[in-house]
Each structure stands twice: as C-alpha cells, then as structure tokens.
Amino acid sequence: MDREYPYGKGPVRLVSSGWLAERLGGPVTIIDCQPNIHDYVQEHIPGAVYLNEGIFRCHSGGLPACWSPPPAIEPFFRSAGIRTGSSVVVYTGVGAYKGWGDGLGQTMAAYSLARYGCRDVLVLDGGLDKWKAEGRPLSAEYPEAGPSGFQADLQTEFFIEYEEFKLIKDRSDVLVLDARPPDVYEGQGPWSRPGHIPGAVNLPWASLMNDKNKSMLKPDAEIRELLRTRSVTPDKTIVCSCGTGREATNEFLLLRFYLGFPEVRIHEGAFTEWVSHPENPTVTGKNPR
C-alpha cells in the first residue's frame, strides 16, 4: 500500500515529490542540504536555499561532533528565512557535481531543525534524486531568503545525554540501536577501539532505505519486518545511536515521528563519546540477539 503524504505525526513528517511540486512558489521554505555547495550551484529545486548540515555541530567539551549551542544556530536559521512555526522542506541528493551524497543529509537536517524548535519539518522522500528522475524542474538561480526572527527552543526530550544513557542502557525495557554498517559495528572503524557499546543491537540505517536511492524509505512492510528481526517494539524505550550521532537521526525520525513509537531518543554523543571514557568497555562480533 502506498504511503499517504504527509506521512507521520509530530514536528517531522515525510512528503512526496508530487506534494512539494504542487506547492512550489507557495509559503513553504525549501532547504537544500546537498553535501557540497557546488552541487547546489549546479542544480537545485526552484526556490531552495542552501544550508549545509555542517553548521549543526561543533567541537565542544573534548568531543568533535557536538550539536551547536542554540545561540550559534539562530543566525544561520534567520538568514535562511526559517521560522519556528512555518513549514520547512529539507532534501539532499547524491550531488551532480561532487557525487558525495549518502542520503543522510536530509535526516540530519530535519532532526536538527526540530531539535532547535521548528514545529513543521518535512523530509522529501527520495530527495533530489527522485525529483530529477521524475523530470521535475531544476534551477540554478539563487532565491531571496530571510531574514526571520527565529528563536531556538531546544527540545531536550529528543536526546539522551551520557550520564543518563549509561544509567539506563542495560535495563530490560531499553533497546539501544546502533545504526552503523555491520562491519564497523562488528570490528574496527575509525575509532580508537573496535566494536560497539555492550548490548547495542545493530540495525544499519541503510537497510531501511531503497537499494538505489538512500534518500527514500523502503515500503512499510519491509521496514516492519526488519524491526521485528531486531525486537524493535513500541513497548520499549528505544535509544538510537551510531558513531557520531548522524546515522542515528535516520532511525530516530523513522521510529519516533513516522511510526509513532512513544519512547524514542537519540544518543547524540554515540560511540565517539562512549570510547572517550577509557573505563567503558566495547565488544566485537555480530548482533547479540
């Protein structure tokens, strides 16, 4: 059965290319978060403003990938014309010029927009690649944007900080999901230590996405079957984690807003924060269940 768009509930939902096409030129702010500005310069959806996801994070407290303080974010959102209560569509793509896109740019941007207080964030299912495949219009013009009076309203209930994470992660009613690829979860990635947080279950974010377009979710039936194999059920508190927090945004949005699971949070510090504490163990190997 096809999804009905907008799909999901709460401050972040999915929309289709057709839905957006009907609203071009209307009161919807469109944010292009392709990984390189040259991709945007070459082509983007008409009316889209460029906002690179790199603005959302900074080095803080000895960690390299912390979400930026709200006062640092506000000028960027204001200059892009983002308003707290208005509709904001975000999308990414592989990138016609650089080809760097992995599909996560739009979930990272959507999570961050909602985190700082945007109340109607819309993710383009299939991103720019689906838009282009359907022959929809593209532009190389730069629209006027902003300024707005955006004021951040940090949604602290979306994320879990280190001390609380360590306290609850081993409870029987808590499930920690690691969104990284299996080879990194099981063995050595770029971190100083291999493996994963003890007890974390591997659900690779890419396994939930279309095989040919990582900006598009698989059909609901396939997603629910993948969740079943990992015992991901709405009666648990789900903590979405990964390496630096970026990959986990994909699963956080899916579970909390698209599927409506009641208790889903994101471990923003993720494995990077975990291994920064020498006393914390890591384990290697396949899923424990």
Image (tube, rainbow, N blue to C red):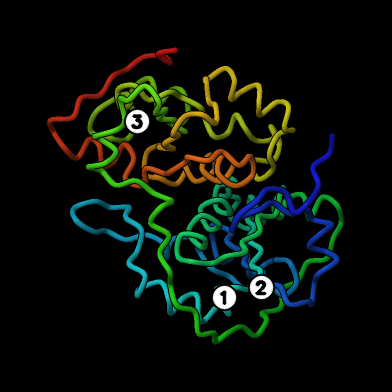
Mark nearer the N terminus (2 vs 3): 2
Expressed as whole percent of the image width and height from the top left, the position of residue 59 reads 27, 58
Q: Quadrant of residue 162?
A: top left
Amino acid at dot 3: Gly
Q: How far apart in space, not on screen, are marks 1 and 2 (Cα)?
A: 7 Å
Mark nearer the N terminus (3 vs 1): 1
185 above or below 57? above
Amino acid at dot 1: Ile
Answer whether labels 2 and 3 touch (C-beta < 8 Å): no
Callout 2: 10 Å neighbours few (<14), some, many (20+)? Answer: many
The residue lying at 57 percent from left, 75 percent from top is 82
In the figure, is residue 113 to the left or right of 92?
Answer: left
| Residue 82, numbered label | 1
The residue lying at 37 percent from left, 21 percent from top is 172
Amino acid at dot 2: Thr
108 above or below 266? below
Mark nearer the N terminus (1 vs 2): 2
13 above or below 281? below
* Element assignment for label 1: loop
Q: Quadrant of residue 47?
A: bottom right
The residue lying at 44 percent from left, 30 percent from top is 177
* Element assignment for label 3: loop
Q: How many badges with numbers are in the image?
A: 3
- The residue at which mark 3 appears reads as 189
| Residue 148, numbered label | none
Answer whether labels 1 and 2 touch (C-beta < 8 Å): yes
Expressed as whole percent of the image width and height from the top left, the position of residue 25 reads 79, 77
In the figure, is residue 15 to the left or right of 157?
Answer: right
Foreground: disc 3 or disc 1: 1
Q: How far apart in space, not on screen, are marks 2 and 3 (Cα)?
A: 37 Å
- The residue at which mark 2 appears reads as 29
Callout 1: 10 Å neighbours few (<14), some, many (20+)? Answer: many
